[in-house]
Image (tube, rainbow, N blue to C red):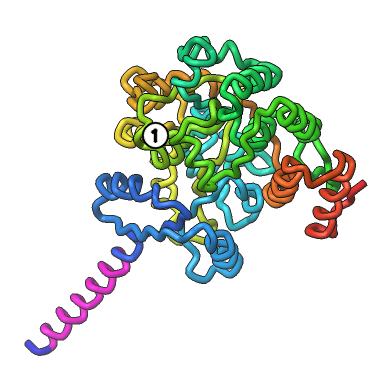
Amino acid sequence: MGKRVMILAVALSFCLIGCSAEEEEKEITIWSFTDEGEYAVEAFVEEHPDVKVNFQFIPSSQYETKLRSALSTGIRAPDVFALEAQYVRKFIDHPSLESLSEAPYDAEALIDSHYEYIQGMERDSNGDVRAVGYQGTTGGVYFRRDLAKEYLGTDDPKEVSEMIETWDDVFSISKRVYEESGGTVHGLPNWNSIGQVQDALVNQAWVVDDKLIIDQAKRDVLDLVDQAIEADALAMLDDWSPGWTASMQQGSVLFYPGPSWYLQHVLQSNAPETSGLWGLASGPAAFSGGGTFYSVYSGSDNKDLAWEFVKMYGFDVDFLQNLAVDEQYYTSHRGANEGVADEITSDFLAGQNYFEFFNEESENVQAVVRSSFDGDINDIFNELMGSYAKGNFRSQEEFWQRFKRDVQTYFPELTIE
């Protein structure tokens, strides 16, 4: 009898160990620099109640460094991790990112559902899918309807779009508005209103074959900023500064170029009492801004579950349409956006159907070639451009000399002519 009890006890202990191991396999860890992922985690757990998801929100200031260390060492590395558009190219070719194009993932069969400019960020240098986007970051020109009525004679988004098809149009309107308002209203908040649109027009990355390349679209930024200053178009308000947010509340700037998330995370959050005073128009060029992508860690023991989460977040139409409706969130998925466009309008935009607007604009945003250097070199360019716009350089030539010097200091391995 004693022997049988012992055998049963041993068998039970093996069962418990096996069950425990099985439970451990039903667990994934996800890292992100934004808490937006919590919505997706809730939806994923509803569909997979037997899976424990450890979602870790790490502040942006620490995220990139912490992620790089975890992926390089493999110590406590997450199964799934988010990448911001600004630095996704730094990671995209690293072997720690699982290639998702082929079996068992077959992302290649899914990727065409995303807009072309999103796909440009999702593929590595060899064309393999290593990151999946869920966010559509298509841009437009947000404008104050009250100012448009007063100075343009209309607040109809389509009519306003026809009035600002070129930068010359924007600067001409800005000059007139500045004069007619007695210098109290500017056309644009700052130089970056021009810079972010031009960034979508570059044809070459900052670095090609370890050599610095200055694309014509970037060179044009200086000419355009010179023209804008001449037309008194710029309010000289730094992005994210108190003056910048105050201008949205006060109505001292007519046009604010920005991506889809600008509506919720900039205008609505900084100027909630101005609801109904805004419209959305197309400007001199289609563009995008920012974006979040998710990748699977190639060293993960739970790649199947990790992929299930990433696949849901990027390609599950039902989930993405719920995200769009519940959160007024424009997604990366063409079909999902088209399926709910009719039912999504914004009271903040005076009832405008902005999903329809972005659906049209998204098809015109070109996929921009990036290199692993682009994020850091863009930071250098943007910082110096802020100084240039304030008149701290005597000439464009002096600007470019300083730019090349700073890039060479930061990246001594590059050839710079």
Compared to residue 385, the image places residue 115 above or below, namely above
Give x and y (percent) for residue 240: 53, 46
- Dot 1 amino acid type: Tyr
Range drawn in magenta: 3-22
Residue depicted at x 54% and y 35%:
108
Residue 349, by quadrant, is top left
Quadrant where the image shows the N terminus: bottom left
Residue depicted at x 34% and y 35%:
273
Q: Which residue is mark 1?
A: 329
Residue furthest left as drawn: 1
Main SS class of the magenta portion in the image: helix
Residue 233, by quadrant, is top right
Residue 72, by quadrant, is bottom right
Of the pair 5 and 80, the residue shown nearer to us: 80
Of the pair 191 and 342, the residue shown nearer to us: 191
**Is any atom of residue 64 visible in this view?**
yes
Residue furthest bottom as drawn: 2
Compared to residue 362, the image places residue 159 above or below, namely above
Magenta span includes 179: no
Crowding at mark 1 (Cα within 10 Å: few <14, some 14-19, many 20+): many
- Residue 22 located left or right of residue 141: left
Give x and y (percent) for residue 159: 52, 10
Compared to residue 12, the image places residue 338 above or below, namely above
**Is any atom of residue 284 visible in this view?**
no
Give x and y (percent) for residue 20: 27, 69
Magenta span includes 12: yes
Question: In terms of secondary structure, where does tag 1 sit?
Answer: loop
Residue depicted at x 71% and y 28%:
228
Give x and y (percent) for residue 95: 63, 56
